[in-house]
Amino acid sequence: MNSVYTHYIYMLLFFLFALTATSQTYPGYYTDNYSGIHSVLHNPANASDSRLEYDLNIVSANVNFLNDYVSGTFSEIIDGDFNFNTDGNVTVKNPNTIQFNNSILGPSLLYSLNPKSAIGITTRVRVSGNVNNIDGNLINLFDVGLSGDSPLIVENNNLNATLSVWNELGFTYSAVIADRKKHFVKVGATAKLVSGRAFITVASDDATVEFDPADQELEGRGTATYTFSKSLDRNINGKAYESFDDFDLKASTLNVGLDLGFVYEWRPNEKEYHAVDIDTNRVGMQHKNKYRAKFGLSITDIGSSTYDSAVSNFYDLDTSIDRSLVENGSLNGDIDDELDPEKNLVNKKIGLPTALHANLDYKIREKLYINLNADLSLIDEEQGDANHIINNYTITPRFESKWFGVHVPVNYQELNGLTIGSGIRLGPLFVGSGTVISNIISDKTGSANYYAGIKLPIYHKPSKDFDNDGVANEIDTCKMIAGLIENKGCPGPQPDDKSQLSKVKDSDGDGTVDYIDKCPYTPGSVATNGCPEDDVFIYSEEAAQEIEAALQIHSDAISFKYDKAYLLPETHAVLDKILEYMNKYPTTKYIVEGHTDPIGTEEYNFNLSLLRALNVKKYFTNKGIDQERLIIKGYGESRYEKGNKSKNRRAAVILIK
């Protein structure tokens, strides 16, 4: 019987290691917001609004195996002298289950097209296998053979087993379809070109095997079917894998597979993550996670791979085989000849391991998250000619930052119960496991999940908005001049461009477009270039003198750096002094003037002065001053005082009286 056992072990080892392998794909790691292309494998909607501008996977792999037939301690297994036949803990059940679902991710790319959409390309080689509803005594027969004085009976076994190898070329597109401040939705899809390389299926119908030591024969009843791709029978003699020369893993017919995904994010504090101008135009900060809670739903691996001219062997098991032939013969040789199967060429379709994934991610505090995930097979385990995953449920606490992340997935799956893993991400390198802690501390282990990879991540840089117009620098054509989001951050077209005037905003609705409105955020008249007629207020002479004297002293200190409009920290104290008088006399109104030196064009300097005035106004309104009390005016270089350029880089606050 050893030759029979060896035949299948070699075949299994070939598929697992010559082509290499992953099941629950990168557990814990794919939940990380910096995992890039690996999160797309789990849900294609994760591609858009990613923390990465580019993510190039060089190579990564995830190896997963689980069963409830044999187990051993981790230390014994890695020691190298462990023998599952003699040292393992065998649990014979009816049924036993074996499952693996593994892959290598080759060169793959995630690319952010813009803040709203992204594309991805993935290349993968995958190996998936499952043995379902097999009587443990039948595994034991193949494993250790017939025992001299022990009878054997396996009754009415309806096993199904599928092992397949295929490669994929995936094309992902993801887009944001709703951004409603607190509510954010994105969707994605991955279309995959699926190319089957090899498969084996085994199915039995009420198969019964009995051994009575008295008559030294193995009796059988029922039927069985054994089918394999022609890629495993290069010499075309109807027998699979007689030697390594039998392999010819040319691609089968090309098929199309599909992944679909949806993500909803709840963003109660979304204002913290956008640059906002006075018109509430928003630009997202792509380098930051904005959600408090995120829910994702996806279906992966919709489709199948097809094979032409596969070899199908139909066995009538209503026969008996001499014990000596069972123990010394070859299942693929002498025993197969004795059973004399009916051989046919068939076209075969092998279903992909279609699964539903539900994922909930919650931010406990900055950089600290908890994730709940369920992976549910949509392929019934009784269904033949298809791969499937084992249902599992995972809770993963994790810490993540741009260059470092650590996670601890705690997983429950129906076959081996609770397992605990761990993983770490260090920039371009990541390594982890869904089972390593359990493997180390458990008295016996029947499952293992490990992964590692190297990639080149290019993260989104923090968004900057030098001119404070709500248009981030990376898309702002006029970085130092406040402008409009629809005009790429510039104020608008030239006034003589008649065809474009209608497209320019009139923020205050006074009939004067922003580009030529010297008070663009305060309603005025055309006669005064968009500014209101100066209101006249009557104060006591003493109050007016007090306010004007204070403004004259403090306004001289509201200065700016060359070619800049942001407020310097040292000016805050000056503005707070002026604020005291605004609060002391709550009916007063003011003009906030902006000025520049003459370096640069007149148009540029006007916009720079306007922005300086706007930032002073925002300082006061943020402190509670009603914006109706403040009018901004930009004077550019028109009030330049010769002999002191730096003094002209200023703002001034003037009392309206």
Image: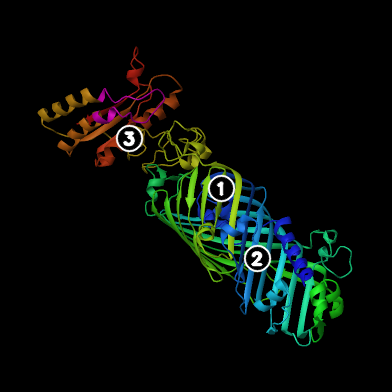
Report the disc number at residue 259.
Answer: none
Tell me residue 469's x, y (percent): 41, 38
Q: Amino acid at mark 1?
A: Phe
* Quadrant in the picture for residue 275: top left
Residue furthest to the front in view is 149
- Foreground tag (3 vs 2): 2
Q: Is residue 569 magenta?
A: yes
Give the extent of the magenta segment.
555-573
Q: Secondary structure at mark 2?
A: loop
The residue closer to the viewer here, 637 or 191, is 191
Residues under labels 1 and 3: Cα distance? 59 Å
The quadrant of the picture occupied by the C terminus is top left
Q: Secondary structure at mark 1?
A: strand
Tell me residue 381's x, y (percent): 63, 75
Q: Secondary structure at mark 3?
A: loop
Q: Is residue 110 left or right of residue 144?
A: left
Badge 2: residue crowd in 10 Å (few <14, some 14–19, many ≥20): some
How many tags in the picture? Answer: 3
Give the mark nearer the N terminus: 1 vs 3: 1
Q: Which residue is mark 1?
A: 430
Q: Relative to 412, does residue 654 appear above or below in the rendering? A: above
Give the mark nearer the N terminus: 2 vs 1: 2
Q: Magenta stretch mostly in which secondary structure?
A: loop
Q: Which residue is mark 2?
A: 84
| Residue 340 appears in view | no
Q: Is residue 299 magenta?
A: no
Q: Is residue 384 left or right of residue 517?
A: right
Q: Which residue is mark 3?
A: 531
Q: Relative to 206, does residue 443 appear above or below in the rendering? A: above
